[in-house]
Image: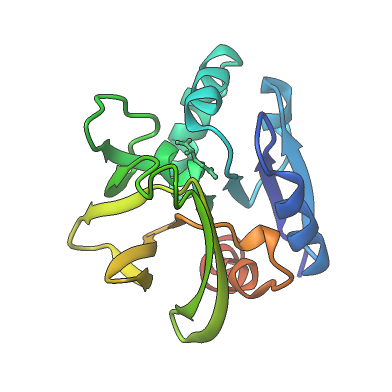
Amino acid sequence: MRKPQIAILALQGAFIEHSRMFSRLGADVFEIRQFADLEHQCDALILPGGESTAQGKLLKELELFEPLKQRIISGLPVMATCAGIILLAEKLCDDDTVHFGTLPVTVRRNAYGRQLGSFYTEGNFGDIPNVTMPFIRAPQIAGYGENVSVLSSHNGVPTAVCFENQLAMTFHPEITEHTDIHEYFLKNIVIPYYSV
Ligand code: GLN
């Protein structure tokens, strides 16, 4: 079987860390920085953490926004971390901005406030125990649609969700030493998609 080709949106934020994770897992990784990069064979898209406003603006300026949105709607596997879930969210609290709007969740940006901007927790992610979850100026999932499954929570608030081809979380697994969540994405979402 050929190797999955993983596209990392590399406009801004923590994209290199995702590349390292997928390379460690034996996938082929390439970066999306401009329109021409869309010609590359692509089995999955990674939306990294960073600043969602800047990412949303760059996506439009570089004319990447519509083609990527169409691919997500068509079923391309997507993994989004932190700012990435803001890009996917159907709705943002107290904000009319919608980026891709493909994930039926409502997200509140910078929900943990300035004081508790960054922290670590450990918890279950689906059936994977003891996953380290770093939160950095993280958003919160304030609501979600009925076909969304919650894979992890912190103090009763969902921190990772899955909906069809979209896996999204409010924390940053890519800055830990553990590849479990990236592996989960490959096994459960990418491989079923590209091996049919
Ligand atoms: N607070 C950022 C935003 O609203 C997200 C932070 C992150 O990705 N670490 O875009």
Give x and y (percent) for residue 25: 77, 69
**Left or right: 91, with 190 as reference point:** left
Closer to us: 4 or 56: 56
Count up the numbered dots. Answer: 0
**Above-or-below relation of 35 to 192:** above
**Left or right: 105, with 193 as reference point:** left
Q: From the image, which quarter does the N terminus lie in?
A: bottom right
Give x and y (percent) for residue 130: 55, 84
Closer to us: 33 or 115: 115
Closer to us: 27 or 152: 152
Residue 153: which quarter of the image? bottom left
- Residue lying furthest top: 61
**Left or right: 7, with 139 as reference point:** right
- Residue lying furthest front: 115
Give x and y (percent) for residue 34: 70, 22
Q: Residue at x 30, y 43 (%)?
A: 108
